[in-house]
Image: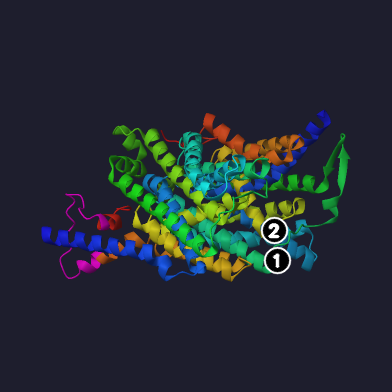
């Protein structure tokens, strides 16, 4: 029993790292653009399908394929922001962006169905099936590689945010958009690039998700609900919060999974509701989501 | 001046009577069950979107958890009928139970969710929605993924749809009447004050939590009832159909297309979108193309009529009427005496 629990914790942390990568993109987009991107889930699945096509048609390795899919997803993100999100203003902006990003999700999902059909697919490579035995735990290579990849990419995002001029303008826009505009930051450009970066990480997240789960075009909804729960729990717009909340939630889910797989995901959402009853801003709520 | 007002009122009254006659005569003229099926679904959605709008449209708290009440109402009727061995027409006596279940669920749901605003509120409603869908899958008494079936109604196929048509028409009329009453009452004014500036509304003495919760529960009660009717019409409910995420988004889309917070807007939205959606699902059975078209429609609405059909048309008509005359700012005094027009012009102003 104790052994099962340790294994569940290790699994939770490893999978949590991958979720953290996807959640960081979502929370970054929220922080800068003040929108919730419902399409994030289906974009992860799009990333998975891109990797799938590259590996089955062109026989490119999953990790090497990221060199193609990450820039491609970046471009898709910038285009979505430029075409649809840029023009939304006014009082109903919150709900409008929700509708727009949901519409984008529906369109992408429909196109994926047209191309790939409804049958579940899974990414495959030599390291997807095999595992290594460390300290008495069985660790699948794909989880280890994925966790390492997630760490590298999250570190890269941190470096981008805290070590570059662009990162400084992103953080300034997150803190106060009008003030950022006044000191000469091109807020529109920051918004477009941030959206691009937030979507680009879904390419890596999608590859990992596709290698560890069977997916079809419909899988995006389950994923986006989990990601939303994670970023709200971590505190909207907080990158550190997203990391901790991902690991916390996925470990919790993996622990409950020992006892009852059916209820594991319920616990996931129930944890969110409970935490918000006690602390409405989440773990690291930067801005008061409840301004009372 | 009073002459034109009374004439306008008479015209509005006549239009309402004509609409009522048309609604009542509809199944007599179009007796085909294929057509009445469209009408029944449109009426179900008119009732539910009006209920949704009563809370979300008036208060500005966009809820994506309305399906929680809809599905719970449906399950309540099914489970109660099975447990108490109620068969035949007697099941209609269970509809108040569906409404009550909606209300009872809304109280704790509202107490938790209404503590937070904007994005967080939306996400909490999504989370609660998923909890309910998963519970419907996992519990034994909800029948898992098989769901619950309704008792057999001893009605001939020819009258089955007609009876449900009038039942859903009744639900829709009741929902709209309640919405009009809420909008005109002080309660509706408080809700809209919360939408415009919640902190200021609190400062002015509105007990925001109480007002929000009351509207949330009222909306849930109607939705639960309609969920029960929907279940009896469809004769079965499964977790993905009772708790359907597309259901919530359709409601938001209908309200936005017509005009959020208005009375007639959501009705028009439902009349356009629900038959359209149903037609596409029947025509393209694989559903992928209808999904792409639905998404494209979303985008078109947001880009071309971001404020909804009703407010945009109202503005357009006003501009047409005042054309050629100096642009006089409208007199802000006296509340609009004409109910038909106040339904058109309000909401987003």
Res. B307 in view: no
Compared across the picture, whether B227 is left or right of B186 comes to: right
Indicate whether A222 appears above or below B287.
above
* Host chain of mark 1: A
Q: Residue at x 65, y 36 (%)?
A: A267
Q: Do tag 2 and tag 1 residues touch (Cβ < 8 Å)? A: yes
Secondary structure at numbered mark 1: helix
Secondary structure at numbered mark 2: loop
Q: Which residue is mark 2?
A: A216
Compared across the picture, whether A215 is left or right of A274 comes to: right
For residue B23, which quarter of the picture? bottom left
* Image coordinates for residue A4, horizontal then vertical, percent: 81, 33
* Image coordinates for residue A226, horizontal then vertical, percent: 62, 45
| The magenta stretch spans residue B323 | yes
* Image coordinates for residue B119, horizontal then vertical, percent: 49, 44
- Gap between marks 2 and 1, in whole Å? 8 Å
- N-terminal of the pair, mark 2 or mark 1, is 1
Mark number displayed over residue A116: 1
The secondary structure making up most of the magenta span is loop
What range is drawn magenta here? B318-340
Indicate whether A17 appears above or below A198.
above
Q: Residue at x 32, y 49 (%)?
A: B180
| The magenta stretch spans residue A67 | no
* Image coordinates for residue B28, horizontal then vertical, percent: 41, 68
């Amino acid at each position: 029993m104790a052994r099962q629990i340790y294994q569940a914790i290790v699994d939770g942390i490893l999978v949590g790292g991958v979720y953290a990568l996807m959640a960081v993109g979502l929370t970054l987009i929220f922080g800068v653009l003040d929108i919730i991107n419902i399409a994030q889930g289906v974009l992860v699945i799009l990333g998975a399908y891109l990797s799938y096509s590259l590996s089955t048609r062109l026989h490119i390795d999953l990790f090497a394929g990221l060199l193609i899919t990450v820039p491609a997803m970046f471009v898709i993100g910038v285009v979505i922001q430029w075409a649809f999100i840029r023009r939304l203003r006014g009082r109903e902006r919150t709900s409008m962006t929700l509708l727009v990003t949901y519409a984008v999700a529906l369109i992408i999902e429909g196109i994926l169905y047209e191309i790939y059909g409804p049958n579940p697919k899974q990414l495959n490579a030599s390291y997807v099936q095999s595992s290594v035995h460390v300290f008495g735990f069985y660790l699948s290579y794909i989880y280890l590689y994925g966790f390492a990849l997630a760490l590298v990419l999250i570190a890269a995002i941190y470096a981008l945010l805290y070590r570059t001029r662009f990162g400084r303008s992103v953080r300034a826009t997150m803190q106060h958009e009008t003030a950022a505009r006044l000191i000469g930051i091109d807020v529109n450009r920051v918004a477009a690039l941030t959206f691009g970066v937030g979507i680009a990480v879904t390419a890596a997240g999608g590859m990992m998700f596709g290698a560890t789960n069977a997916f079809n075009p419909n899988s995006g909804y389950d994923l986006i609900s989990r990601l939303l729960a994670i970023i709200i729990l971590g505190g909207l717009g907080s990158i550190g919060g997203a990391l901790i909340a991902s690991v916390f939630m996925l470990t919790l889910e993996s622990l409950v999974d020992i006892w009852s797989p059916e209820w594991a995901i319920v616990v996931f959402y129930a944890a969110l509701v409970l935490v918000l009853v006690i602390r409405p801003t989440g773990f690291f709520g930067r801005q008061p989501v409840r301004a009372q | 001046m009073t002459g034109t007002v009374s004439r306008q009122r008479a015209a509005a009254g006549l239009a309402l009577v004509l609409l009522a006659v048309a609604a009542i005569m509809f199944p007599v003229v179009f007796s085909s069950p294929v057509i009445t099926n469209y009408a029944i679904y449109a009426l179900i959605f008119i009732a539910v979107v009006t209920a949704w709008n009563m809370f979300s449209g008036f208060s500005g708290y966009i809820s994506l958890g309305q399906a929680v009440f809809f599905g719970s109402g449906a399950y309540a009727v099914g489970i109660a009928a099975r447990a108490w061995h109620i068969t035949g027409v007697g099941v209609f006596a269970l509809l108040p139970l569906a409404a009550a279940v909606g209300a009872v669920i809304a109280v704790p749901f509202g107490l938790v969710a209404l503590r937070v605003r904007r994005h967080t509120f939306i996400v909490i409603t999504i989370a609660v929605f998923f909890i309910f869908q998963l519970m419907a899958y996992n519990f034994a008494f909800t029948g898992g993924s098989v769901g619950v079936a309704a008792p057999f109604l001893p009605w001939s196929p020819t009258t089955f749809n007609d009876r449900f048509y009038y039942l859903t028409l009744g639900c829709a009329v009741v929902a709209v009447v309640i919405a009009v009453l809420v909008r005109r009452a002080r309660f509706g004014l408080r809700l809209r004050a919360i939408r415009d500036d919640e902190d200021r509304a609190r400062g002015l003495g509105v007990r925001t939590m109480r007002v929000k919760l009351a509207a949330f529960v009222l909306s849930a009660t109607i939705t639960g009832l309609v969920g029960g009717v929907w279940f009896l019409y469809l004769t079965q409910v499964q977790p993905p159909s009772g708790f359907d995420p597309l259901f919530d988004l359709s409601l938001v889309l209908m309200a936005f297309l017509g005009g959020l917070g208005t009375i007639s807007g959501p009705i028009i939205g439902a009349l356009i979108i629900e038959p359209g959606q149903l037609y596409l699902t029947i025509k393209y059975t694989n559903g992928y193309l209808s999904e792409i078209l639905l998404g494209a429609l979303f985008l078109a609405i947001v880009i071309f009529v971001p404020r909804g059909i009703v407010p945009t048309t109202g503005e357009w008509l006003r501009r047409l009427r005042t054309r050629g005359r100096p642009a006089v700012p409208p007199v802000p005094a006296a509340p609009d005496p004409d109910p038909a027009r106040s339904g058109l012009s309000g909401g987003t102003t």
